[in-house]
Amino acid sequence: MLKKTTVQKLSDLAAGLMEKGALIAPVREEAGHNFREISDPAAVDLDFYNTLLSPKSVFFPHTEDFIRYKTGASIAEAVCVEPDIRPTVLFGVRPCDVKSFEIMDIHFTGTGKVDPYWAKRREAATIFGYAFDPNTPADPADFYSTLGIGAADPEGSDVFMIRKDQDLLLQAVSPKGEKLLSELPSLSDASADDQKYFDGTVAAGRTFKTRFTCVEAEPIAKKFEDLFHNAAFWEKVSEACLSCGACTFVCPTCYCFDICDETLFSQGTRRRVWDSCMFTDFTLEASGHNPRTKVYQRLRQKISHKYSYHIRKYGPISCVGCGRCTRNCPVNIDIFSIVNEAMKA
Amino acid sequence: MATSFKQIEENLKTEAGKLLDAGKVSMVLAYGRGYDEKHPLPYVARSLADVDGMVFNEYCTANLARYLVRYPRGTKIGIAAKAADSRAVIQLIQEDKVKRDDLVILGIPVYGMKNAKTDEAIDAKTTCGLYNPVIYDVLLGEEVHGQPVLSPYEVLEKVEAMGQDERFAFWKKELDRCIRCYACRKACPMCYCDPCFIDQNKPKWGEKSPETGGNLMYHLTRFHHLAGRCIDCGECSRACPVDIPLYLFHKKVAKECEEMFGQAAGMSIDEKPALINFRVEDSDKILE
Amino acid sequence: MSFEPKILGIACNWCTYTGADLAGTTRLQYPQNLRVVRVMCSSRINPSFIFKAFQLGADGVLVGGCHPGDCHYNTGNLYARRRLAVTKKILEFSGMEPGRFRVEWISASEGNKFAEVVREFTEEIRNLGPQTKFKIS
Ligand code: SF4
Ligand code: SF4
Ligand code: SF4
Ligand code: SF4
Ligand code: FES
């Protein structure tokens, strides 16, 4: 059953959701919108294109504490840190980002080894997807249609939201979403017209075009395999790359991390901290040897991982075309252009 | 009248072409086409054929001096350098990272550069505010004159006027937002250390996690390492995905260095960097 | 409980550290709040030492070196003077109370001055109270 509310009454909806658990939603910040835990329902802001940082940190925080220990004490005295898992509503996620969760699930739960932190957080979350507006052009950096993602795909969300002028239409997609929606008194029933609009938008989203090029998993995986030893190609496309970590940290499908022991005096915490294959020391070995000393080798890793190794190992391309890496690259390196050039090479 | 961007682009192509054709340089560092007009890309031309790919427009903000240390010593390089960028080139020469003789500097007088993210003009608020390159072999347009010359330090007033506690709260709030992507140091022409102190783990200066302790250590030390060397190009702050106004701190340190040591970074190839130098007449007053 | 400041001293081997020794052997009284680390020269001091000391909970940091012109390595402290002046400005602009960091030139024969400086600095830090800004818990 399609439900509706208005943008003016968004804070009522937010307040209702906060009764169900932690609400994580887009808020306006200095540099753009970001997903944050909401304490003031009025702070939820749906007037954004897409968030600056991806929502991956909701399930895979930048820092995750695992163990607390005392130096000099026995291992038996170390304690596991219980993750803080609460029922969560993740609100206002764009379809490409919703898709990223499915890809990340492969690594954290789908390979036979389940990462309990990711799995429990995913389990505890209800996702409210939020359609892009197919009537306004996409950001020039986006290319999610290339990856087969529509501007208004409800798949993967528990509830899917479409904005209709000043109205917000909400459709339950999963039983979890269905149940939650039925418990929200601030929502009213939508009309048949609204339903038509909703379905029309989902359909329009499927033909909506961001930057587009025809990329298929198998041929592109092969292409990058063939290009692996083509240093000239990689040197050329990476000539501007600074080898910073901006692209990987904003990316919804980058999941590399480092395990760090942070000790202060005799108290320590073993924690997981995001890492980036673009960092110089990412591949530095204890012997001092570093197999990837050159910028081109690191950029090759980043792109081939997403568009080749990942396909070979798990099937899908590990990129959803959200455009964040391109938008945030200090020197405007664009993964879409590199993929295009690879296909021509 | 400032030379138009289109004209500068033409001149850039012509001069780069001449240099490559005559074999005077083996590469020219310039700007090339990005995924759209607004997002040009640092670009290297190695042959006459590559020259066509060059562009120059108001969004060509990257400081190309950053790339100079990447190529083997002795490589003959042509480099397109805007005002602040030319100061970075000078500073790198002072630090013996590149040799003057190995460079052909294609100076670009700039007026009307824009930040692609905000579309705001790039001026003395976030950079040194100079219009004309300090050093060049060829100038790709007419020098810009008659434009207001603003102090690059005026923007500091607000933060300088704060009390200690308020200022600490200000920086804590800003630096706590840092996600430690290190785009700032990587975009900086003066941050060429390998490894950077923050990547060392023996001793470990700061934690890797993006929290107050490590963030403060990373940034304060980096501000220190840039003292007397930062040429106020503003790249670090433009590179920052979360828009931390690093330039404010760098400007303050630069201002203090200028006052204490009587020299600004990157203004003359005959100077030594202020912090690897001293004068016998330096006074203890600076320690007060 | 009254506040007993924790102060890190970093002293060069040839002058200030020897001066501190002299203060000790001549049994001059000075507060016990200072813990001294010896370095070979004031120019060996990495500014990060100072930031780190504050992060680890120092309430004040005192650097001691030879008088300008007297450095065992001739010019070490002339470089150090410039560098530490910058450190001071950076601390100040970050919001740290400027009084928490001090540089003093104390020669090997100035045991008296050493004791005097420590007394005065300890008093100053005591007045400033505990340093909480940089401290990581
Ligand atoms: S592609 Fe851009 S964001 Fe990524 S490492 Fe290179 S310079 Fe940094
Ligand atoms: S610190 Fe920032 S402003 Fe200074 S030279 Fe480096 S990038 Fe430019
Ligand atoms: S922060 Fe310091 S150590 Fe790191 S690259 Fe910059 S100058 Fe070098
Ligand atoms: S670029 Fe910004 S977010 Fe990244 S490390 Fe520097 S200050 Fe932090
Ligand atoms: S040896 Fe004392 S300051 Fe250099």
Image (tube, coloured by chain):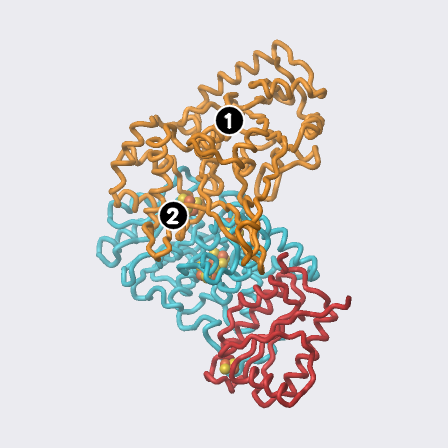
For label 1, the residue is: A95
Looking at the image, residue A273 lies above or below residue C41: above
Left or right of B263, for residue B160: right
Look at the numbered disc 2 and say if its residue's Cβ is closer than 8 Å to ligand 1.
yes
Spot occupied by residue C111 in the image (x, y as percentages of width and height) = 62, 87
Q: Chain of mark 1?
A: A
Q: Colour of chain A?
A: orange
Name the one closer to the observer, B208 or A214. Answer: B208
Q: Which residue is at a point 29% across and 52% down the rendered structure image?
A: B16
Look at the numbered disc 1 and say if its residue's Cβ is closer than 8 Å to ligand 1.
no
Q: Which residue is at a point 42% across and 39% down the rendered structure image?
A: B37
| Amino acid type assigned to the residue bearing label 1 in the image | Pro
Q: Colour of chain B?
A: cyan
Q: Chain of mark 2?
A: A
Q: Look at the image and tell me whether residue B14 can be seen.
A: yes
Q: Which residue is at a point 42% across and 69% down the rendered structure image?
A: B268
For label 2, the residue is: A241
Q: CA–CA distance between discs 1 and 2?
A: 29 Å
Spot occupied by residue B237 in the image (x, y as percentages of width and height) = 52, 52
Q: Colour of chain C?
A: red
Name the image quarter holding the C terminus of chain B: bottom right
Spot occupied by residue A221 in the image (x, y as percentages of width and height) = 31, 32
Residue furthest top in the image: A192
